[in-house]
Image (cartoon, grey):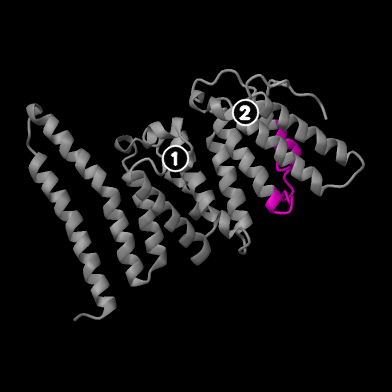
Amino acid sequence: SLPPHTSSRVSLVKVRRHNLAGTVYQSSKYGGVDDSEDGEREEGWKQLEEQMFRRWELFAVCYSKMGDRKLTCDAFVESVKAFPYGSSGLGHLGRSATPSSAFSANASTKQLGGIIDRLTYAATCELFLPLAEVSLLTARKPGVITDEVLGLLLERQISTLEPCLRKDSMQIILRGLLRDALSVYKATVIPLHRARVLLKCMEFLLKDGDANGGETCWTAKHLCGEVLQLLAVEDLVHDSAFVPFRLQHTVAVHLWLRLFVYRSTGSPMTSTMSYHVEEACNVLCGLVPNSPTETNPKTKRSP
Protein backbone atom coordinates (compact mmCIF):
# COMPACT_ATOMS: atom_id res chain seq x y z
CA SER A 1 0.00 0.00 0.00
CA LEU A 2 1.08 3.58 -0.62
CA PRO A 3 2.18 5.89 2.24
CA PRO A 4 -0.62 8.31 3.35
CA HIS A 5 1.09 11.35 1.84
CA THR A 6 1.67 9.62 -1.51
CA SER A 7 -1.86 8.27 -1.50
CA SER A 8 -3.24 11.80 -1.05
CA ARG A 9 -1.20 13.08 -4.00
CA VAL A 10 -2.41 10.21 -6.17
CA SER A 11 -6.00 11.08 -5.23
CA LEU A 12 -5.41 14.72 -6.17
CA VAL A 13 -3.95 13.70 -9.54
CA LYS A 14 -7.03 11.55 -10.17
CA VAL A 15 -9.32 14.51 -9.43
CA ARG A 16 -7.35 16.75 -11.80
CA ARG A 17 -7.50 14.12 -14.54
CA HIS A 18 -11.24 13.82 -13.95
CA ASN A 19 -11.68 17.60 -14.39
CA LEU A 20 -9.54 17.56 -17.53
CA ALA A 21 -11.53 14.64 -18.92
CA GLY A 22 -14.76 16.59 -18.39
CA THR A 23 -13.32 19.57 -20.26
CA VAL A 24 -12.11 17.42 -23.17
CA TYR A 25 -15.44 15.63 -23.29
CA GLN A 26 -17.39 18.86 -23.50
CA SER A 27 -15.03 20.21 -26.15
CA SER A 28 -15.26 17.11 -28.33
CA LYS A 29 -19.00 16.75 -27.90
CA TYR A 30 -20.00 20.35 -28.55
CA GLY A 31 -17.14 21.71 -30.62
CA GLY A 32 -18.86 21.33 -33.98
CA VAL A 33 -22.60 21.27 -33.38
CA ASP A 34 -25.07 23.41 -35.28
CA ASP A 35 -27.89 25.54 -33.94
CA SER A 36 -30.39 22.65 -33.99
CA GLU A 37 -28.50 21.03 -31.11
CA ASP A 38 -28.37 24.11 -28.89
CA GLY A 39 -30.82 22.61 -26.41
CA GLU A 40 -28.68 19.53 -25.83
CA ARG A 41 -25.58 21.69 -25.60
CA GLU A 42 -27.12 23.98 -22.99
CA GLU A 43 -28.23 20.97 -20.93
CA GLY A 44 -24.69 19.58 -21.03
CA TRP A 45 -23.16 22.84 -19.86
CA LYS A 46 -25.80 23.13 -17.14
CA GLN A 47 -24.79 19.72 -15.80
CA LEU A 48 -21.12 20.68 -15.94
CA GLU A 49 -21.84 23.92 -14.09
CA GLU A 50 -23.72 22.07 -11.36
CA GLN A 51 -20.82 19.63 -10.94
CA MET A 52 -18.05 22.22 -10.92
CA PHE A 53 -18.49 23.40 -7.33
CA ARG A 54 -18.43 19.77 -6.14
CA ARG A 55 -15.15 19.22 -8.00
CA TRP A 56 -13.61 22.20 -6.22
CA GLU A 57 -14.89 20.79 -2.93
CA LEU A 58 -13.19 17.50 -3.78
CA PHE A 59 -9.97 19.41 -4.45
CA ALA A 60 -10.29 20.96 -0.99
CA VAL A 61 -10.75 17.56 0.65
CA CYS A 62 -7.65 16.24 -1.12
CA TYR A 63 -5.59 19.26 -0.08
CA SER A 64 -6.83 18.75 3.48
CA LYS A 65 -5.66 15.13 3.43
CA MET A 66 -2.27 16.42 2.31
CA GLY A 67 -2.20 18.81 5.27
CA ASP A 68 -2.14 22.02 3.20
CA ARG A 69 -4.73 24.21 4.94
CA LYS A 70 -4.16 27.28 2.77
CA LEU A 71 -4.82 25.41 -0.48
CA THR A 72 -7.81 23.79 1.22
CA CYS A 73 -9.31 27.21 1.96
CA ASP A 74 -8.53 28.48 -1.53
CA ALA A 75 -10.29 25.49 -3.09
CA PHE A 76 -13.32 25.96 -0.83
CA VAL A 77 -13.53 29.62 -1.91
CA GLU A 78 -13.45 28.56 -5.57
CA SER A 79 -16.21 26.07 -4.79
CA VAL A 80 -18.37 28.89 -3.41
CA LYS A 81 -17.68 30.99 -6.52
CA ALA A 82 -18.56 28.07 -8.83
CA PHE A 83 -21.80 27.23 -7.04
CA PRO A 84 -24.88 27.20 -9.37
CA TYR A 85 -26.81 29.99 -7.65
CA GLY A 86 -29.50 30.12 -10.33
CA SER A 87 -30.47 26.46 -10.61
CA SER A 88 -30.18 25.88 -6.85
CA GLY A 89 -32.88 28.45 -6.13
CA LEU A 90 -30.63 30.43 -3.79
CA GLY A 91 -31.21 33.58 -5.84
CA HIS A 92 -34.91 33.43 -5.06
CA LEU A 93 -34.28 32.42 -1.44
CA GLY A 94 -32.09 35.48 -0.95
CA ARG A 95 -35.16 37.65 -1.57
CA SER A 96 -37.63 35.60 0.44
CA ALA A 97 -35.95 33.54 3.17
CA THR A 98 -33.84 34.04 6.27
CA PRO A 99 -30.26 32.70 6.20
CA SER A 100 -31.11 29.63 8.29
CA SER A 101 -34.03 28.76 6.00
CA ALA A 102 -32.08 29.44 2.81
CA PHE A 103 -29.22 27.11 3.74
CA SER A 104 -31.58 24.27 4.66
CA ALA A 105 -33.91 24.60 1.67
CA ASN A 106 -32.44 21.76 -0.41
CA ALA A 107 -29.44 19.43 -0.67
CA SER A 108 -27.37 21.90 -2.72
CA THR A 109 -27.80 24.86 -0.38
CA LYS A 110 -27.11 22.62 2.62
CA GLN A 111 -23.87 21.52 0.97
CA LEU A 112 -22.94 25.15 0.26
CA GLY A 113 -23.58 26.04 3.90
CA GLY A 114 -21.24 23.27 5.02
CA ILE A 115 -18.52 24.48 2.65
CA ILE A 116 -18.82 28.04 3.98
CA ASP A 117 -18.62 26.78 7.57
CA ARG A 118 -15.46 24.80 6.88
CA LEU A 119 -13.61 27.52 4.96
CA THR A 120 -14.58 30.24 7.44
CA TYR A 121 -13.47 28.27 10.50
CA ALA A 122 -10.23 27.14 8.87
CA ALA A 123 -9.38 30.63 7.63
CA THR A 124 -9.93 32.30 11.01
CA CYS A 125 -9.24 29.71 13.70
CA GLU A 126 -6.51 27.65 12.03
CA LEU A 127 -4.75 29.95 9.55
CA PHE A 128 -5.53 33.25 11.32
CA LEU A 129 -5.94 35.00 7.98
CA PRO A 130 -6.83 38.72 7.79
CA LEU A 131 -10.37 39.84 7.08
CA ALA A 132 -9.68 40.47 3.39
CA GLU A 133 -8.88 36.77 2.93
CA VAL A 134 -11.74 35.53 5.11
CA SER A 135 -14.68 37.57 3.87
CA LEU A 136 -16.68 36.12 0.98
CA LEU A 137 -17.21 39.67 -0.24
CA THR A 138 -14.51 38.61 -2.72
CA ALA A 139 -17.03 36.18 -4.24
CA ARG A 140 -19.01 39.08 -5.70
CA LYS A 141 -19.85 38.34 -9.34
CA PRO A 142 -22.11 41.01 -10.88
CA GLY A 143 -24.91 39.43 -12.86
CA VAL A 144 -24.37 36.04 -11.21
CA ILE A 145 -24.46 36.62 -7.46
CA THR A 146 -27.01 39.22 -6.37
CA ASP A 147 -26.52 41.45 -3.33
CA GLU A 148 -29.17 39.45 -1.45
CA VAL A 149 -27.27 36.20 -2.06
CA LEU A 150 -23.88 37.74 -1.27
CA GLY A 151 -25.35 39.02 1.98
CA LEU A 152 -26.57 35.50 2.80
CA LEU A 153 -23.03 34.17 2.34
CA LEU A 154 -21.64 36.80 4.70
CA GLU A 155 -24.38 36.18 7.27
CA ARG A 156 -23.56 32.47 7.17
CA GLN A 157 -19.93 33.30 7.92
CA ILE A 158 -21.02 35.46 10.85
CA SER A 159 -23.17 32.70 12.34
CA THR A 160 -20.28 30.24 11.91
CA LEU A 161 -17.93 32.41 13.96
CA GLU A 162 -20.34 33.54 16.68
CA PRO A 163 -19.46 30.62 19.01
CA CYS A 164 -15.79 31.62 18.66
CA LEU A 165 -16.27 35.25 19.73
CA ARG A 166 -13.88 34.96 22.69
CA LYS A 167 -10.97 33.71 20.58
CA ASP A 168 -8.09 36.09 19.87
CA SER A 169 -8.79 38.66 17.13
CA MET A 170 -12.23 37.18 16.48
CA GLN A 171 -13.94 40.47 17.36
CA ILE A 172 -12.06 42.20 14.56
CA ILE A 173 -13.08 39.57 12.00
CA LEU A 174 -16.73 39.53 13.10
CA ARG A 175 -16.95 43.31 13.08
CA GLY A 176 -15.48 43.33 9.57
CA LEU A 177 -17.93 40.69 8.31
CA LEU A 178 -20.85 42.66 9.75
CA ARG A 179 -19.54 45.78 8.06
CA ASP A 180 -19.24 43.90 4.76
CA ALA A 181 -22.82 42.64 5.07
CA LEU A 182 -24.05 46.18 5.69
CA SER A 183 -22.17 47.40 2.62
CA VAL A 184 -24.09 44.85 0.54
CA TYR A 185 -27.54 45.46 2.03
CA LYS A 186 -28.35 48.97 0.81
CA ALA A 187 -30.84 50.90 2.95
CA THR A 188 -32.59 52.30 -0.13
CA VAL A 189 -33.06 48.88 -1.78
CA ILE A 190 -33.44 46.17 0.87
CA PRO A 191 -33.98 48.00 4.19
CA LEU A 192 -35.31 44.99 6.13
CA HIS A 193 -32.29 42.89 5.18
CA ARG A 194 -30.12 45.71 6.53
CA ALA A 195 -32.21 46.03 9.70
CA ARG A 196 -31.66 42.31 10.39
CA VAL A 197 -27.88 42.76 10.25
CA LEU A 198 -28.01 45.92 12.37
CA LEU A 199 -29.80 43.94 15.07
CA LYS A 200 -26.98 41.41 14.88
CA CYS A 201 -24.56 44.34 15.28
CA MET A 202 -26.37 45.34 18.48
CA GLU A 203 -26.08 41.78 19.79
CA PHE A 204 -22.37 41.69 18.94
CA LEU A 205 -21.80 45.10 20.55
CA LEU A 206 -23.42 43.93 23.79
CA LYS A 207 -21.39 40.69 23.89
CA ASP A 208 -18.21 42.59 23.07
CA GLY A 209 -18.56 44.77 26.15
CA ASP A 210 -20.09 47.74 24.32
CA ALA A 211 -16.69 48.46 22.74
CA ASN A 212 -17.21 50.32 19.47
CA GLY A 213 -13.58 50.50 18.45
CA GLY A 214 -13.77 54.27 18.18
CA GLU A 215 -16.45 54.16 15.48
CA THR A 216 -19.33 56.55 16.18
CA CYS A 217 -21.72 54.47 14.09
CA TRP A 218 -21.09 51.47 16.38
CA THR A 219 -23.10 52.70 19.35
CA ALA A 220 -26.40 51.36 20.65
CA LYS A 221 -28.09 54.71 20.10
CA HIS A 222 -26.96 55.01 16.48
CA LEU A 223 -27.77 51.40 15.60
CA CYS A 224 -31.20 51.64 17.23
CA GLY A 225 -32.02 54.86 15.41
CA GLU A 226 -31.15 53.38 12.03
CA VAL A 227 -33.11 50.17 12.67
CA LEU A 228 -36.26 52.06 13.62
CA GLN A 229 -35.84 54.33 10.59
CA LEU A 230 -35.52 51.31 8.28
CA LEU A 231 -38.54 49.60 9.83
CA ALA A 232 -40.63 52.67 9.01
CA VAL A 233 -39.87 52.49 5.28
CA GLU A 234 -43.08 52.11 3.24
CA ASP A 235 -41.66 51.23 -0.17
CA LEU A 236 -40.58 47.59 0.19
CA VAL A 237 -40.59 46.45 -3.42
CA HIS A 238 -37.56 44.21 -3.00
CA ASP A 239 -38.24 43.37 0.65
CA SER A 240 -41.95 42.61 0.62
CA ALA A 241 -41.39 38.99 1.72
CA PHE A 242 -39.92 40.24 5.00
CA VAL A 243 -42.79 42.53 6.02
CA PRO A 244 -44.01 39.95 8.61
CA PHE A 245 -40.66 40.37 10.40
CA ARG A 246 -41.13 44.10 10.90
CA LEU A 247 -42.95 43.73 14.23
CA GLN A 248 -40.45 41.13 15.44
CA HIS A 249 -37.55 43.46 14.65
CA THR A 250 -39.30 46.35 16.41
CA VAL A 251 -39.68 44.30 19.58
CA ALA A 252 -36.08 43.10 19.33
CA VAL A 253 -34.57 46.58 19.03
CA HIS A 254 -36.38 47.80 22.17
CA LEU A 255 -35.34 44.73 24.16
CA TRP A 256 -31.73 45.06 23.06
CA LEU A 257 -31.78 48.73 24.08
CA ARG A 258 -33.23 47.76 27.45
CA LEU A 259 -30.20 45.50 28.00
CA PHE A 260 -27.80 48.29 27.00
CA VAL A 261 -29.47 50.67 29.43
CA TYR A 262 -29.30 48.05 32.18
CA ARG A 263 -25.52 48.00 31.84
CA SER A 264 -25.21 51.76 31.82
CA THR A 265 -25.26 54.20 34.71
CA GLY A 266 -27.12 57.41 35.34
CA SER A 267 -30.32 58.67 36.96
CA PRO A 268 -32.68 58.18 33.96
CA MET A 269 -31.79 54.49 33.82
CA THR A 270 -34.94 53.08 35.44
CA SER A 271 -37.40 55.20 33.46
CA THR A 272 -35.60 54.50 30.18
CA MET A 273 -35.62 50.76 30.84
CA SER A 274 -39.34 50.91 31.56
CA TYR A 275 -39.94 52.85 28.37
CA HIS A 276 -38.30 50.24 26.14
CA VAL A 277 -40.08 47.35 27.87
CA GLU A 278 -43.39 49.19 27.52
CA GLU A 279 -42.80 49.84 23.82
CA ALA A 280 -42.01 46.16 23.21
CA CYS A 281 -45.11 45.09 25.14
CA ASN A 282 -47.30 47.51 23.19
CA VAL A 283 -46.16 45.97 19.91
CA LEU A 284 -46.80 42.46 21.21
CA CYS A 285 -50.23 43.44 22.53
CA GLY A 286 -51.09 44.70 19.07
CA LEU A 287 -50.73 41.13 17.80
CA VAL A 288 -53.36 39.82 20.23
CA PRO A 289 -56.99 40.03 18.97
CA ASN A 290 -59.20 42.38 21.00
CA SER A 291 -56.18 43.57 22.94
CA PRO A 292 -56.92 46.78 24.94
CA THR A 293 -53.60 48.26 23.84
CA GLU A 294 -52.60 48.44 20.21
CA THR A 295 -49.66 50.53 19.10
CA ASN A 296 -48.45 51.05 15.57
CA PRO A 297 -44.77 49.97 15.59
CA LYS A 298 -43.88 52.90 13.36
CA THR A 299 -45.25 55.38 15.89
CA LYS A 300 -42.82 55.96 18.70
CA ARG A 301 -42.52 58.48 21.45
CA SER A 302 -39.34 59.79 22.98
CA PRO A 303 -38.18 58.01 26.16
Instruction: Judge from the rendering whether residue 63 lies leftward or rightward of residue 218; answer left or right.
Output: left
Q: Which residue is mark 2?
A: 247
CA distance separating discs 1 and 2: 19 Å
Q: Is residue 224 magenta?
A: yes
Q: Secondary structure at mark 1?
A: helix
Residue type of the residue flagged with mark 2:
Leu
Q: Classify mark 2: residues with Cα within 10 Å, few (<14), some (14-19) or many (20+).
A: some
Vertical side of 123 occupied by 106: above or below: above
Task: Find residue 183 and report its horizontal and vertical position in percent.
Answer: 56, 38
Instruction: Judge from the rendering whether residue 33 lies leftward or rightward of residue 16; answer left or right.
Output: left
Vertical side of 52 occupied by 300: above or below: above
Task: Find residue 111 and report its horizontal and vertical position in percent.
Answer: 35, 50
Q: Nearer the viewer, residue 103 or 284?
A: 284
- Contact (Cβ within 8 Å) of mark 1 with mark 2: no
Q: Nearer the viewer, residue 2 or 266?
A: 266
Q: Which mark is residue 224?
A: none
Residue 282 in view, yes or no: yes
Chief secondary structure of the magenta portion: loop
Residue 186 in view, yes or no: no
Q: Nearer the viewer, residue 259 or 5?
A: 259
Residue at x 16% of width, y 39% of height: 44
Outermost front residue: 290
Q: Secondary structure at mark 2?
A: helix
Instruction: Judge from the rendering whether residue 64 lies leftward or rightward of residue 200; answer left or right.
Output: left
Residue type of the residue flagged with mark 1:
Ser
Residue at x 63% of width, y 25% of height: 288
Q: Which span is picked out in magenta? A: 206-225
Vertical side of 184 occupied by 208: above or below: below
Q: Which residue is mark 1?
A: 101
Task: Find residue 252 and report its horizontal and vertical position in percent.
Answer: 66, 37
Residue at x 50% of width, y 50% of height: 157
Outermost right residue: 267
